[in-house]
């Protein structure tokens, strides 16, 4: 008779080995190795997160670093993709001055397939707004994950519609421990250097003076990384609720369809002044649902007529 309990926990506790499937490339996660839990039909990936020449780190330092990664992988929260394990290996790499032995650490983690971007594109194709109850599910899921990260002093640094996922198996909105997978502060520095307009739209105003400058955001003490993440999430909400359509005043347009509490939440997220913008802890002080007298009709709102007259300009 099968044991009772959470199916995910049962798989993690009872798989016999990891079967390598293939090397894959993910636009958000980079180069990955895909594995299957044997004998279960469940998939996970591993990513190289650390590579250091052996001569720069003795054995004790290597083991201490691996221990830190293993401890970090134990951090669990329902709205964060599970980092399952970390492992190390030594390999030889060719270089300009001959071969170099390097110490590498890989992290194994769940791989989310359906991004919020893809989910919104599905709605865009049908020309239906996201029902407000679902919007609050998205907000609460991301809020719980990011509040948990902030309490553990972990910034994310890569909040976009393509880095928030909808877990169809568990019906949860979830994010990755981006700092663990991408390297501490690495994504803030990547933001700083990017010229991609699809990425730059998520940048908080206080970060833009440092774009292409020699000072990294890591060295810029006046920037609060959690408030940077909050701003990015506000842009995520605008993109999703407008179905990527461009409006001169998107909040004014959305006010026709959504409650005052939701508009207040988004306005606080995209507050241009970081001194007035809340972090994730502060956002929890705001109402996270519409009040009874602000309830919006929960049916899907057909908006085809709104968009057919607007051309194809998109807000991405």
Image (tube, rainbow, N blue to C red):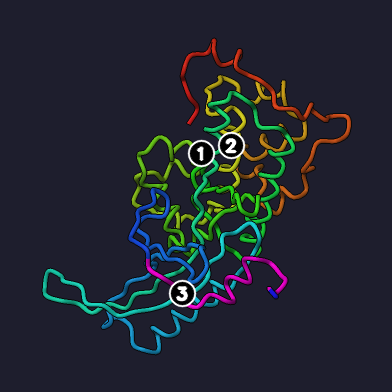
Q: Secondary structure at mark 2?
A: loop
Q: Position of residue 159 (x, y in %)?
A: 53, 47
Q: Secondary structure at mark 3?
A: strand
| Residue depicted at 43% across the width and 63% down the height | 45
- Please tell me how many numbered marks the rendered image carries: 3
Q: Please name the residue that numbered disc 2 is placed on.
A: 272
Q: CA distance from mark 1 to mark 3?
A: 29 Å
Q: Position of residue 123 (x, y in %)?
A: 58, 30
Tag on residue 118? Answer: 1
Q: Secondary structure at mark 1?
A: helix
Tag on residue 86? Answer: 3
Contact, mark 1 vs mark 3 (Cβ under 8 Å): no
Disc 3 residue crowd, few under 14, some 14–19, many 20+, Cα 10 Å: many
Relative to residue 259, is residue 283 depicted above or below?
below
Please report whichever mark, 1 or 3, sits nearer to the chain's N-terminal start: 3
Q: Position of residue 17 (x, y in %)?
A: 46, 76
Please report whichever mark, 2 or 1, sits nearer to the chain's N-terminal start: 1
Disc 1 residue crowd, few under 14, some 14–19, many 20+, Cα 10 Å: some
In this rendering, the label closer to the viewer, 3 or 2 = 3
Q: What's the magenta region?
A: 2-20
Say whether residue 113 is left or right of residue 241.
left
Confirm whether the magenta stretch covers residue 9: yes
């Amino acid at each position: 008779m099968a044991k009772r309990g959470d199916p995910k926990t049962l798989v993690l506790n009872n798989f016999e080995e990891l079967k390598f499937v293939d090397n894959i490339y993910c636009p958000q996660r980079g180069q990955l190795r895909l594995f299957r839990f044997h004998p279960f039909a469940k998939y996970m990936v591993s990513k190289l997160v650390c590579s250091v020449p052996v001569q720069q780190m003795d054995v004790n330092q290597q083991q201490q670093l691996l221990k830190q990664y293993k401890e970090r992988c134990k951090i669990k929260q329902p709205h964060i993709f599970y980092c399952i394990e970390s492992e190390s290996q030594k390999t030889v790499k060719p270089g300009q001055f001959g071969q170099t032995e390097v110490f590498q650490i890989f992290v194994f983690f769940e791989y989310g397939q359906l991004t919020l971007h893809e989910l919104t594109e599905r709605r865009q194709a049908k020309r239906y707004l996201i029902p407000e109850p679902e919007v609050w599910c998205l907000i609460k899921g991301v809020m719980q994950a990011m509040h948990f990260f902030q309490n553990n002093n972990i910034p994310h640094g890569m909040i976009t519609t393509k880095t928030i996922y909808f877990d169809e198996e568990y019906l949860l909105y979830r994010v990755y421990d981006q700092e663990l997978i991408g390297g501490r502060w690495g994504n803030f520095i990547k933001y700083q250097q990017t010229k991609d307009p699809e990425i730059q739209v998520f940048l908080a105003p206080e970060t833009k003076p440092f774009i292409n400058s020699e000072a990294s955001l890591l060295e810029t003490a006046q920037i609060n990384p959690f408030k940077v993440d909050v701003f990015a999430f506000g842009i995520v909400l605008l993109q999703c609720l407008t179905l990527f359509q461009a409006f001169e005043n998107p909040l004014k347009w959305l006010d026709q369809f959504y409650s005052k509490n939701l508009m207040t939440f988004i306005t606080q997220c995209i507050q241009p002044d970081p001194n007035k913008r809340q972090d994730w802890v502060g956002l929890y002080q705001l109402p996270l649902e519409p009040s009874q007298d602000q309830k919006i009709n929960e049916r899907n709102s057909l908006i085809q007529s709104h968009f057919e007259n607007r051309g194809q300009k998109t807000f991405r």
